[in-house]
Image (tube, helix red, strand yellow):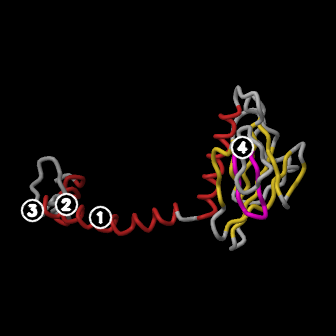
């Protein structure tokens, strides 16, 4: 007998569950339907318990949720500004920790400004740190205003948020692209390494 054939026969005797062309299999070669169903049920149960905690971890981060709400308000301001003959402004009130969109009304009464379309109140634990724009400078006290042109353009502006646990977030407004980039840190306006 050829040595290669003898090696193959010896291997088949040691591993009877393997399938070879023309070879007989004495062991099981796969899983039964019941075994597959049991594994699928176990995976479903584990996923059912893990998903709610994962979802709550993603959506209960107040800093990220507040940043998402502000991104929506800023996008709304850019859209509302297009084609309007009067200014569209975002007002940042650092004392009352809120931001509101004014689409052309008076802003003398800080409690109920005229023309307010939307407002975001910062949740407990989240604060407005400052607003820094290319032409308006940095402001972190009283109120700050970001104006949108009739074409929806805005100065290059960075809005900084902070949570009570010390985490920072920066919303970076692009002047002409209507792009809002969010960074999970405090980014200075003068940082030339940042691109949109």
Which residue is disc 2 drawn over? 36
Name the secondary structure under disc 1. helix
Q: Which mark is residue 26?
A: 3
Instruction: Give the alpha-carbon distance from disc 2 to disc 4, as whole Å.
Output: 60 Å
Instruction: Give the alpha-carbon distance from disc 3 to disc 4, as whole Å.
Output: 80 Å
Instruction: Give the alpha-carbon distance from disc 2 to disc 3, as whole Å.
Output: 22 Å
Which residue is disc 4 drawn over? 102
Q: Nearer the viewer, mark 3 or mark 4?
A: 4
Name the secondary structure under disc 3. loop
Between disc 3 and disc 4, whose residue precedes?
3
Residue 187 in the image: above or below residue 49: above
**Is residue 35 located in the magenta-colored stretch of the structure?**
no
Between disc 4 and disc 1, whose residue precedes?
1
Name the secondary structure under disc 2. helix
Which residue is disc 1 drawn over? 43
Q: Which residues are magenta?
A: 90-102
Which residue shows up at 76% across the image and 50% down it?
91
The picture places residue 164, in percent across and down from the top left corner, at 69, 72
Packing grade of label 3 (10 A; few <14, some 14-19, many >=20) is few
Packing grade of label 1 (10 A; few <14, some 14-19, many >=20) is few
The picture places residue 8, in percent across and down from the top left corner, at 21, 56
């Amino acid at each position: 007998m050829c040595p290669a054939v003898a090696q193959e026969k010896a291997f088949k005797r040691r591993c009877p569950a393997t399938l070879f062309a023309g070879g007989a299999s004495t062991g099981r070669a796969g899983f039964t339907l019941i075994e597959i169903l049991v594994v699928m049920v176990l995976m479903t149960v584990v996923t059912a318990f893990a998903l709610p905690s994962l979802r709550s971890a993603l959506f209960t981060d107040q800093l990220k949720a507040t940043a998402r709400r502000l991104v929506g308000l800023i996008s709304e301001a850019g859209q509302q500004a297009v084609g309007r003959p009067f200014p569209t402004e975002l007002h940042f009130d650092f004392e009352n920790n809120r931001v509101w969109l004014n689409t052309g009304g008076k802003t003398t009464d800080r409690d109920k400004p005229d023309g307010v379309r939307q407002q975001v109140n910062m949740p407990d634990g989240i604060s407005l740190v400052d607003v820094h724009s290319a032409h308006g400078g940095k402001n972190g006290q009283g109120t700050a205003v970001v104006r949108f042109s009739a074409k929806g353009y805005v100065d290059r502006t960075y809005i900084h948020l902070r949570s009570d646990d010390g985490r920072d977030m920066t919303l970076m407004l692009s002047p002409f692209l209507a792009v809002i980039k969010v960074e999970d840190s405090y980014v200075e306006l003068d940082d030339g390494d940042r691109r949109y």
